[in-house]
Image (cartoon, coloured by chain):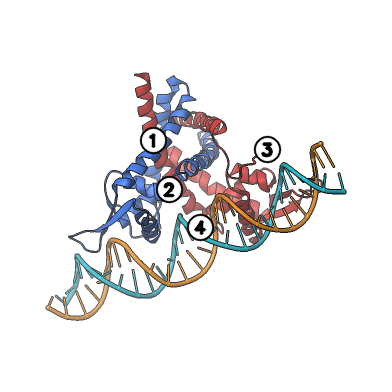
Chain colours: A red, B blue, C orange, D cyan
Amino acid sequence: MENKALDELATEMYEIVHELLKKYQFRDRNQICCHDITVSQCYVMSELKTAPLSMRSLANALFLDISTMSRVVDQLQKKGYAEREQDPGDKRIIYVSLTESGKKLLSEIEENLIASEKEILQQISPAARHSVLFVLRELEKSVAGWQHHCCVVPGKNQSIS
Amino acid sequence: MENKALDELATEMYEIVHELLKKYQFRDRNQICCHDITVSQCYVMSELKTAPLSMRSLANALFLDISTMSRVVDQLQKKGYAEREQDPGDKRIIYVSLTESGKKLLSEIEENLIASEKEILQQISPAARHSVLFVLRELEKSVAGWQHHCCVVPGKNQSIS
DNA sequence: TTGATTTATTTGCACAATACAACTAAAACG
DNA sequence: CGTTTTAGTTGTATTGTGCAAATAAATCAA
């Protein structure tokens, strides 16, 4: 009985999450690509927002192969939004960081994305908004936990550092 | 004061949704691509689960250009998972439907995806599970409402039928 | 009815995303 | 010092994507 209910919840959750994914991906495409950048490029820039990262850390953070990473960074570098810098200690490691213009562009885009979240939140009753955030936080933790115990990243040798 | 709080919620929501998107996209890549199919192809099959759709309806449902649709359907057809059929009334319209083997494959994949949602749900306290579903439903409605009043689909001439 | 317009789809084209495998270079290990 | 591991790039192939042009069918207007 308890299990039956859980199966039904899981099925419903699959459907809703599927819809949400679709709609949010569309929003991202729509709001990011009218700037000078693609969705993948923007995702990479987001990861670099707080600190430079090595190629492998970037790839791990985005669950992508390191060769894919290398090429996306090529694009960003060509456009002047990111820079590569060799680690002076370990010369194998390349750190990627945002340039000033990269930071500026990212801020603009994130401002738009946050504005759209705000509009979405405004369609939810003020009383319920905090519970939405609470639930999303919980869900994010669960998904993270689930992935940790069950998945492997494409590039295999992930140090997850 | 009220506005300030809303801005903060929106910012936090942006960050959490971003993380969730990333992780769920990775899950989809991981769980779908070990079958005989890509993520985009699977998304198309999902749309066809309940009934055949015209090319344009498919493209609208997935927020993609109709030319992209045409090609993804090519792939599915080549693999024997989908079929095209001309509408006998209006000969411009092509209906796409799943073949038997397409339905079978989709069931298998969805079973896996639902199983992973179940594992994710199990990491959430039983008491909280219903509220997770409730909140996701609300959020989905809000995002749908937001897109309705603010966005346009790539193919432009959307009849949204 | 016929010519113009709209609508549904496909194709041509160009480029981005992606992974795997092969390669290079540097570090670590014994 | 030679072997192995690690970080990154490049070659190759496939898919995804959108815009524009082409095609074909339906609709609309005189």
Amino acid on which the number 3 mark rests in the picture:
Ser
Residue at 49% from the left image edge and 25% from the top image edge:
B123
Residue at 40% from the left image edge and 50% from the top image edge:
B41
Q: Are marks 1 and 4 on the same chain?
A: no
Are discs 4 and 2 less than 8 Å apart at CB?
A: no
Q: From the viewer's perspective, is the residue at label 1 or at label 4 nearer?
A: 1
Give how far apart the Cα atoms at labels 2 and 1 are: 15 Å
- Left/right placement of residue A119 relative to residue D9 reads left
Q: From the viewer's perspective, is the residue at label 3 or at label 4 nearer?
A: 3
Q: Chain of mark 1?
A: B
Task: Report the residue marked by disc 4.
Answer: A34
Task: Report the residue marked by disc 3.
Answer: A161
**Vertical order, B41 against A15 (above or below):** below
Q: Which mark is residue B111?
A: 1
Specify few, some or many for label 1: CA neighbours under 10 Å numbering under 14, 14-19, or 20 or more: some
Give how far apart the Cα atoms at labels 4 and 2 are: 34 Å
Q: Are marks 4 and 2 on the same chain?
A: no
Comes first in the chain, label 2 or label 1: 2
